[in-house]
Amino acid sequence: MDFTVVDAALVGKLLLLLLIGMGPKIALVPFLEKTHAFDTETKARIGRQMVLIAVVTALILFATGALLMRLLHITGGAVAVAGGIILALIAIKMASGPTEKPHDDFAAPVDPDKLAIFPLAVPYLLNPVGITVIIIASGEVVSIASAILVTALILIVGALDYLVFTNIDKLAKRMKPVTMIVSEVVFGILLTAVAVQLIVAGLGNLGIITPTAAH
């Protein structure tokens, strides 16, 4: 990412990456599956906590990402490869279709506060794409304006997440199960491609391969 010029193209690219990296789509189905036994008020509380944790974590990563990379002696390329590998694992599971076991009404109760933190806030809401993009952006911002841009976009995406997950029951009534399954599989395939692209870009950044320019 080139932050030397803050223009519409940069804003659009960052917004798209953050919508993939911390938008509601990847977390939506896991949220519905893992909170099905809770009442509407508890679901909304889990949603609020999940979004708050994801946004605060994202902002902390942005504030400290460059320092962490220097302290750990890692590069943006290494972060991209690592993020691509973890994303591929999540995306392949999505692309494989539903594999959840039937809900067990006699299973041990789940602590909603812990559920909001893991796995819903991280790695589903703030997923490997978001973590990778934010850490790399932290190391590449060159001005206060570019730092404000990234921070603002994180907050905008977080506001969208808040609207979705605090009104999840209303939205769920409008979602057809078949449509959700199909979209999950399709999005999983697309995310697998994103994961491959992250790995290729990371390997190129590390000088291990020379990526071919897209035509």
Image: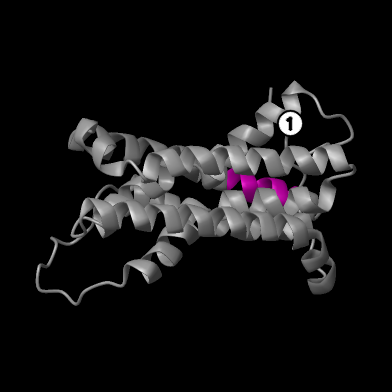
Which is more toward the observer, 120 or 140?
A: 120
User: Taking the image as drawn, is residue 188 in sight?
Assistant: no
204 lies left or right of 124: right
The residue identified by callout 1 is 213
- Mark 1 burial class by Cα count in 10 Å: few <14, some 14-19, many 20+: few
For residue 68, what is the image quadrant? bottom right
Is residue 61 on the magenta stretch? no
Q: Residue, x 38% and y 45% (percent of image)?
A: 165
At label 1, the amino acid type is Ala
Vertical position of residue 49 compared to residue 142: above or below: below
For residue 2, what is the image quadrant? top right
Q: Residue, x 19% and y 38% (percent of image)?
A: 177
Return the residue found at the far front: 41
Q: Position of residue 24 (x, y in %)?
A: 44, 42
Vertical position of residue 62 compared to residue 192: above or below: below
- The stretch of residues the image draws in magenta is 196-204
Q: Position of residue 194 (x, y in %)?
A: 55, 42
104 lies left or right of 168: left
Dominant secondary structure of the magenta stretch? helix
Q: Residue, x 47% and y 58% (percent of image)?
A: 121
67 lies left or right of 98: right
